[in-house]
Image (cartoon, rainbow, N blue to C red):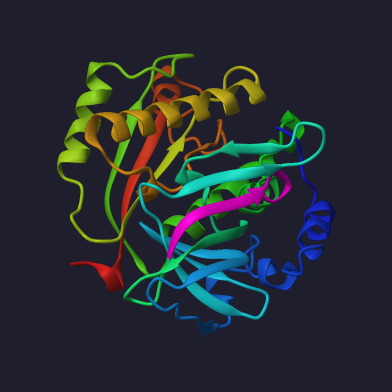
Amino acid sequence: MKIWHSRSITLLLASLGLVVIIGTLLPGSGYAQLAPGQKRTIAANEEAKIKGVILSRDGETFVLRDITRKDTVVLLTDTTKIRTVRKGLFRGHEPFDVTVLQTGLIVEVKGKGDAEGRMVAEDIQFTEADLKAAITANVRSAPVEKELAETRKEVVDTNQRISSLDQYDLVKTVSVLFPVNKATLGSKQKAQLDELAAKAPTAKNYMVEIQGFADPTGDFKKNMELSQRRANAVVKYLTVKHDIPLRRISVPMGYGSTKPVGDVKTAAGRADDRRVEIRILVNKGLKE
């Protein structure tokens, strides 16, 4: 994975006039420091196009702040198109699913207003550079072993910032274990996910947070890729088998061996580290 240094990120964001807003979302700042913006209401069926930064995501909606500090609630649907704009010789669009929409990502949204004053998103676009910058700002994953210690601390800090937000209740946590060097789901893992899906909350705005991990043996880069494949396997099973919408899943991330839970010196401890953690989060103010 390529490292995007803080100077590069700042230059990218500054070029879009949103560096001040993004700065409040970078690690160490905390969401609580966000100054309230002016709420934008869009009339029913009114067409709109807004460019801004994603401040937060709650299930099927996210809050978009533009350069004038106006906040728009954007509603995602099954027909919302999400894609990145490619520049250069091979111009065009690469499609993405809704799990890529995360805090700190600069996007341009086209859509229409609904009866509640929200914007129903029809098309969401962003650049590859902004996607890399947002991912790096949320999780600074270094691809070399000598930076493992620093990466581990930043990943843990990010994990705590996402999972311990004051506005969320942690409903349930499940850890699915994998064999050595494997990223496929067996009958035992599927049974765990079946039970989780059966007990999924019926609240309007729940989120599913999925994080993949590997044990510390082997190459660091390989572990990062393996943990990502494990996270993706869980996402695919939950969406295909149990029809959990992708828009309810926060960006699935592979963290390699950056967060061990077992004794890495023992076989049993390393087995506990080959896992995917699934968390169900429900917004306190929106629970039914």
Task: Out of 205 and 140, give the one closest to the viewer.
Answer: 205
Residue 120 lies, in percent from the top left, at 41, 63
Q: Which residue appears at 21% of the width and 39% of the height?
A: 196
Q: Please name the residue shown 63% across and 47% down the image.
A: 135
Asked if residue 287 lies left or right of residue 151, the reply is left
Q: Position of residue 95 (x, y in %)?
A: 55, 38
Provide residue 183's location: percent of width, then percent of height: 43, 19
Q: Which residues are magenta?
A: 120-130
Q: Nearer the viewer, residue 159 or 10?
A: 10
Q: Position of residue 202 (x, y in %)?
A: 18, 55
Q: Is residue 124 above or below residue 175?
A: below
Say above or below: 190 vs 86: above
The N terminus sits in image quarter: top right
Q: Is residue 9 left or right of residue 262?
A: right
Res 43 seen here: yes
Q: Is residue 187 above or below residue 104?
A: above
Quarter of the picture containing the C terminus is: bottom left
Can you tell which quarter of the image residue 103 is in? bottom right
